[in-house]
Amino acid sequence: MRFLNTALLLALTVLAGCANLEQAEPLITPRASNAPLMPTAPGLSPIAKGQVRHETVTPLALPNDLWERIRKGYAMPNLDNELVTDRTQWYSNKPDYLQRMGERSSKYLYHIVEELEQRNMPTELALLPFIESAFNPQAVSSARASGMWQFMPATGKSFDLKQNAFRDDRRDVQASTRAALDYLERLYKMFGDWHLALAAYNWGEGNVRKAITRNQNAGLPTTYADLNMPMETRMYVPKLQAMKNIVGNPSTYSVSLPNIPNHPYFQSVPLPRDMDVTVAAKLAEISLDDFKALNPSAHRPVLLAAGIPAILLPWDNAEVFQRNYEASATGRMATWTAWIAPSTMKVSDAAQKVGMSEADFRSINNIPPHMMIRAGSALLVPRTSHMADDVTARVADNGRLDLSPEQVLKRITIKASKQDTVASIAKRNNVKPEQVAEWNKVAANASFKSGQQVVLFVSGKVRSGNTHIAATKGKKVTVTSNSKANAGTKYAKR
């Protein structure tokens, strides 16, 4: 009996040990040998069973505040001089301005910080649009730099930022940020110094190279502080350093930054078809201003799906847009489309072709006075049953508005022949009969007496006193192009 009790106790102990092994190491395949799973380094003893404590490691909490996340990623060397002190004081003395800029930046900062961290770039670069554009993606400088990152047209093209009749990617939130960081990365690799890279971003890499070469030839240092540069560039890095100082420790400067959650503000939503901007905003249930703030590259009243395959919407409104679109997908989404000018023509003629008033046609296509539309130009016109299809990718991606000055018209006089009429003179001189009638204050069906002076306005440079034979097919023409002869006529182009 004693033997049976002992055997039973031993068996229970073994079973208990096996049960504990299965619970503690469920992913380890049992081995036939009792040898250690890993070899032990010389001079070290293997860890005995029971010495390892299993504890739950608390994951590092991400900052709830995006400003704190930016501070943690500061990696550029600080600049400390009188200009930095001056700019720091200037910004800190304008709390309302900082508040407005901060609120405007809240739509874009998270995306910029994400992109910087993925590239392992200093996060204070996220503050650069404060300096460039006050975080206004629709900002345009007097030098034609555009967007939040202020790309010049040529620089934008070199970084694949499309600029055509329907969109300007220099204003696109995602595309311009990608291009700006590509450019800054390239400049940093070129100069090996963030301050010089920033100077080159503002002044141009060629100018910075020349300034460095001048100092090298003169035996002078080549740091940002030592180079000779324009005042705008001299102030550029101090401005960024000032913003870095204020964001880094706002209480020191008695500044209150707006709360920006460490969470995406927007998400990208596919654009299924051509759609008016007002319709897209309505489907997303946001204001037109809020829609334009996230989609500033679409500077026309219609979004062309072939050129803009996705739009940005506030995080919570993306699903709203999808739901509302699906509920009304069969309805009309776009009232505008693209029309390609078949030949070079006057604005009035083009407007008549597409059924618009000249004033409306000029306004919607931003055509200034005294300009003609060149063949192949892409223009915005009302969508009709004859032009109901979505715009093709070729037009949406490459459509351009090409204009040329109207031809200068010269006032000439000719002598009418026997049996000449308004129509015959118009045909002979390649002008319209109604023009001949208006120029000569006669009826459209009027006839002229033999030798009667007839006024015409024709294109081409003709010197006063010359005889213009070709335009009138043998008729002698007296040209009067002096100021008195042309004074008061609305047809003489200056």
Image (cartoon, rainbow, N blue to C red):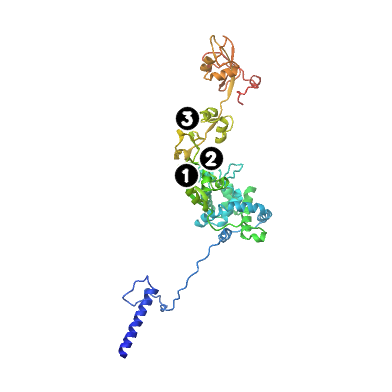
Residue that label 2 marks: 301
Separation of disc 2 and disc 1 at Cα?
Answer: 20 Å
Mark 2–mark 3 CB contact (< 8 Å): no
- Residue type, numbered disc 2: Pro
Q: From the viewer's perspective, is residue 149 above or below residue 437? A: below
Asked if residue 308 shows in the view, the reply is: yes
First in residue order: circle 2 vs circle 1: 2
Residue 494 spot, x, y in % from top left: 62, 26
Residue located 52% across and 51% down the image: 317
Q: Between tags 2 and 1, which lies in front?
A: 1
Packing grade of label 2 (10 A; few <14, some 14-19, many >=20) is some
Secondary element at tag 3: loop
Residue located 66% across and 20% down the image: 484
Packing grade of label 3 (10 A; few <14, some 14-19, many >=20) is few
Separation of disc 2 and disc 3 at Cα?
Answer: 23 Å
Q: Which mark is residue 425?
A: none
Secondary element at tag 1: loop
Q: From the viewer's perspective, is residue 10 above or below residue 344? A: below
Residue located 53% across and 20% down the image: 432
Q: Residue furthest front?
A: 327
Quarter of the image where one finds residue 36? bottom left
Residue 49 spot, x, y in % from top left: 41, 78
Residue that label 3 marks: 342
